[in-house]
Amino acid sequence: METADRGVGLAAQAYATLKHAIITHELPPGTRLSVPMLAERLGVSRSPAREAIARITHEGLAHFEPNRGAVVANVDSTSLAEIYEIREVLEGLAARLAATQITDTEIAELRSLIAEHAAAVEAGDVEQHYELDVRFHRRIHEIAGNATLTGQLERLQQQVRLAMYTTHRSPGGMPQALAEHRRIVDSLESRDSALAEAAGRSHISRLLRDLVAAQAAEAREQPEISEQGA
């Protein structure tokens, strides 16, 4: 039993280390994830390494390519926009479900996360902002009580984190996100499922609009960059 527990622990450790390396682009998109390489890198046997790669692939942080095996995924701006389109609907549904069963204790938990988030925004801490954003949404998913929905949103959220490490890391949007989170909690506290769904969807649709605007701005700047390089 002790050997089995140790194996589970090593697999979990390998997964956490691999995930962090991918999210932070220590292992950039396109990196091949071979089992021998990962086992050596993490100092584990091949079995935990293989399990870690399988879990990462299931979460959409890697995919399999012919003749290459598992490769770190590349979530570019176009892919991110598509993810937001799906996430808008699912986050709205999660908020709708959560509003029908949320407790006063759970409302207090969300308010506590909001307070932590406000401190991070005040300090301009982008890393903490992203961590608290994930925790906030994940807690709502849990309260919604739909395991299938939670699994789908978790997978999408991991892909968003992968993309956001190199895109839109300016602190400029942090206060707006915080204000939107407050509106979501207010709507949950009212136990109005329609209002909660609208608040959840509005938050993600705003992120999508910002992303589209950023894509348009990049497109306008591209000719100038090309001319300067000529």
Image (spheres, rainbow, N blue to C red):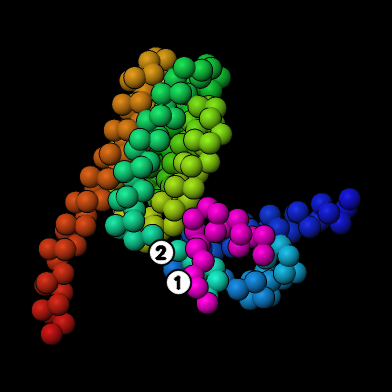
Q: What is the CA distance from the residue labelled 2 to the residue labelled 1?
A: 7 Å
Quadrant of residue 14 within the rendered picture: bottom right
User: Measured from the top left, where is residue 64 in percent x and y?
Assistant: 51, 66
Taking the image as shown, residue 65 lies to the left or right of residue 200, namely: right
| Residue 131 visible in this rendered orientation of the protein | no
The answer to which image quadrant residue 221 occupies is bottom left
Instruction: Please report the bounds of the magenta region as a residue range.
Output: 50-67
Q: Amino acid at mark 2?
A: Asn
User: In the displayed structure, does residue 106 sit left or right of residue 157?
Assistant: right
Q: Which residue is mark 2?
A: 74
Q: Are marks 2 and 1 in contact (CB under 8 Å)?
A: yes
Q: Secondary structure at mark 2?
A: loop
Q: Position of residue 54 (x, y in %)?
A: 61, 59
Pointer 1 local density, CA inside 10 Å: few below 14, some 14–19, many at least 20: few
Q: Is residue 220 visible?
A: yes
Query: Callout 1: helix, strand or loop?
Result: loop
- 14 drawn magenta: no
Q: Residue at x 82, y 52 (%)?
A: 5
Q: Residue furthest bottom?
A: 230
Instruction: Choose between 118 and 28: the one closer to the eye.
Output: 28
Residue 54 in magenta?
yes
Residue 227 higher or lower than 207, as above or below: below
Residue underneath mark 1: 30
Where 148 falls versus 219 (above or below)? above
* Image quarter (top left, top right, bottom left or bottom right) of the C terminus: bottom left
Residue 218, position as x, y percentages in the image: 19, 62
